[in-house]
Amino acid sequence: AISFTAYAFSRYRFVGRKNGLLTFLILQMIPNFAALIALYVLAQLTGLIDTHLALILIYVGGAIPMNTWLMKGYFDTIPKELDESARMDGAGHFRIFWQIIMPLAKPIVAVVALFTFIGPFTDFILASVILRTPENYTLAVGLYEMVAKKFGNEFTTFAAGSVLIAIPISILFLSLQKYFISGLTAGGTKG
């Protein structure tokens, strides 16, 4: 959905486009912890306190403005002539998007995937406010509880847990690395 939105903002001119982009820009300026009380009240009113669903909804909703803006910026660098030539060959909007734009946008999709994975995986503040019971703690909150409790001396377990947190992130980064490199070098050649 983010890629569709970013593509629409990049390629089409429509009423509300400027205001939509401005809204996304303003929403990026507000960090999650600035809206912490409002998010807590919303989770409480909807009965989602101490649930992972609350965190999922907040993380997904919070990622939309930044990821849309990132993808829109990348789509702006893809020449519009590719769209026009495909349109002359009879391709529709969805075919242009899926068969021309998205294969060229693999580097930004990899970046968005990595950011979207790392953000919630390492978040502490929001998870510690929304989640109340130890069974529901995320890794970051659980690790903090190991050393924060009274007479907490589980530093070796904490260190091992910290290393284990880095493994999935490293695996994801290594598997997406070729897309990062191709994205960096794609604009570096002349000719």
Image (cartoon, rainbow, N blue to C red):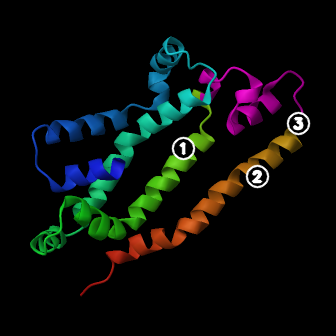
Residue holding disc 3? 154
The answer to whether residue 93 is left or right of residue 71 is left
Compute the Cα span from label 1 to label 3: 25 Å
Give the image location of residue 174, x and y in percent: 60, 67
Element at label 1 = helix
Q: Is residue 24 above or below residue 4?
A: above
Element at label 3 = loop
Q: Are marks 1 and 3 in contact (CB under 8 Å)?
A: no
Element at label 2 = helix
| Residue name at image x 24 percent, y 59 percent | 94
Compute the Cα span from label 1 to label 2: 17 Å
- The reply to whether the magenta stretch includes residue 147 is yes
| Residue name at image x 62 percent, y 42 percent | 122
Which is nearer the N-term, disc 1 or disc 3?
1
> Amino acid under label 1?
Gly
Which is nearer the N-term, disc 2 or disc 3?
3
Q: Which mark is residue 163?
A: 2
| Residue name at image x 35 percent, y 41 percent | 65
Image quarter (top left, top right, bottom left or bottom right) of the C terminus? bottom left
Numbered marks: total: 3
Give the image location of residue 53, x and y in percent: 56, 30
Q: Which mark is residue 119?
A: 1
Q: Could you tell me what secondary structure mostly forms the magenta stretch? A: helix
Q: Is residue 124 above or below residue 181?
A: above
| Frontmost residue, 150 versus 113 | 113
> Amino acid under label 2?
Val
